[in-house]
Image: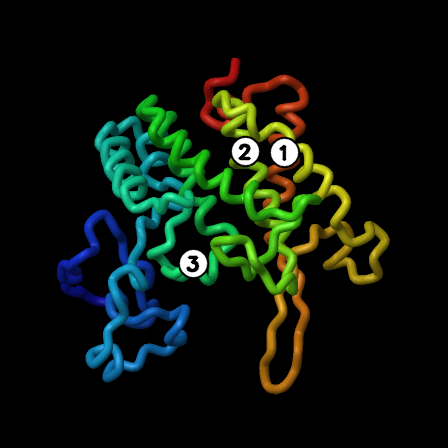
């Protein structure tokens, strides 16, 4: 691809990482929001009306890469960088427990992505593992409490939900149910017993809301419901995404360990006997 200049500093971007690199050119996009402006960058529009920094960059702590690098290399500098990343994340958390200023959320709270905020919260749990600082646990608990507030009585969560929990109820998101369950299981084993009843609701939901094992379409057989409604070329398509099942498997494996009396955080972080 050749050499490319280091992206210039973007005012207001402290503690953030750019989201998109053009795979064809290697260029870091620092002025174009693919989620709202489209996958094809219009250079003229990007110059005349560049996207705000929080639409092209975010903490990008999902999956806690720096933590894993520290854990597997033994090089403490990566843990230090991870904690700096977590501090920047915590500083930008909204009182609701969400991160409203970053896409794919909307800053006014009119649209909350069902999984993005949980990725951030789970990273805060890893920051606690590294530092022992309970500020990170409290931040993650705020995110989990928001899910408790907006979920339906039976545990259902919807894809298109605002900060108050209002939804068009058209798209059921089993992946969010499961991922919130993972977060709450981990918080429970850190001492947040308030999430115990909700964990059971989520477990029941995931077992009940699956396609039949005998479904004639083997792609759907046994899958957890995670629907999206798409309109393209005058045609409506109802999709079921695999992320419902993948997150459900992750939750259910931890749920089984919890039922056995195991500490899921110790198991996840290699501290289990």
Q: Is residue 264 visible?
A: no
Q: Residue at x 53, y 23 (%)?
A: 189
N-terminal of the two: label 2 or label 3? 3
User: Which label is found at residue 109?
Assistant: 3
> Toward which corner of the image does residue 76 lie, by quadrant?
top left
Horizontal side of 270 relative to 246 (left or right) equals: left
Horizontal side of 126 relative to 149 (left or right) equals: left
**How many numbered circles are shown?**
3
User: What residue occupies the far bottom of the structure in this picture?
Assistant: 234
Q: Residues within 10 Å of mark 3 (few under 14, many from 20)?
A: some
What residue sits right under mark 1 in the picture?
199
Q: Residue at x 70, y 44 (%)?
A: 154
Q: Nearer the viewer, residue 214 or 35?
A: 35
User: Which label is found at residue 236?
Assistant: none
| Percent of width and height locating residue 123 | 40, 38
Q: Nearer the viewer, residue 7 or 180?
A: 180
Q: Nearer the viewer, residue 100 or 66?
A: 100
User: Which label is found at residue 184?
Assistant: 2
**Circles 2 and 1: CB distance less than 8 Å?**
yes
Q: Residue at x 20, y 66 (%)?
A: 2
Q: How far apart in space, not on screen, are marks 1 and 3 (Cα)?
A: 26 Å
Q: Residues within 10 Å of mark 1 (few under 14, many from 20)?
A: many
Q: Quadrant of the N terminus?
A: bottom left
> Toward which corner of the image does residue 173 lie, by quadrant?
bottom right
| Percent of width and height locating residue 233 | 59, 86
Q: How far apart in space, not on screen, are marks 2 and 3 (Cα)?
A: 23 Å
Q: Nearer the viewer, residue 165 or 60?
A: 165
């Amino acid at each position: 691809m050749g050499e490319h200049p280091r992206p210039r500093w973007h005012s207001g971007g402290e503690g953030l990482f750019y989201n998109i690199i053009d795979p064809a050119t290697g260029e870091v996009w620092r002025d174009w929001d693919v989620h709202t402006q489209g996958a094809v960058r219009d250079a003229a529009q990007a110059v005349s009306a560049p996207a705000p920094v929080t639409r092209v960059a975010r903490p990008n702590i999902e999956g806690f890469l720096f933590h894993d690098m520290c854990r597997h290399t033994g090089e403490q500098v990566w843990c230090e960088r991870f904690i700096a990343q977590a501090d920047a994340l915590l500083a930008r958390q909204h009182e609701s427990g969400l991160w409203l200023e970053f896409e794919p959320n909307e800053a006014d709270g009119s649209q909350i992505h069902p999984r993005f905020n949980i990725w951030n919260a789970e990273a805060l749990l890893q920051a606690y593992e590294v530092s022992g600082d309970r500020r990170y646990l409290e931040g993650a608990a705020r995110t989990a409490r928001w899910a408790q507030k907006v979920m339906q009585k039976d545990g259902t969560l919807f894809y298109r939900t605002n900060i108050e929990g209002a939804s068009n109820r058209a798209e059921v998101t089993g992946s969010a149910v499961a991922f919130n369950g993972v977060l709450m299981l981990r918080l429970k084993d850190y001492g947040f017993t308030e999430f115990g009843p909700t964990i059971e609701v989520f477990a029941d939901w995931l077992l009940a809301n699956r396609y039949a094992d005998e479904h004639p379409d083997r792609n759907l057989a046994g899958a957890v419901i995670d629907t999206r409604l798409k309109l393209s070329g005058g045609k409506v398509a109802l999709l079921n995404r695999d992320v419902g099942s993948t997150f459900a498997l992750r939750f259910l494996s931890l749920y089984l360990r919890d039922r056995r009396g195991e500490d899921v955080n110790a198991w996840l972080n290699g501290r289990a006997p």
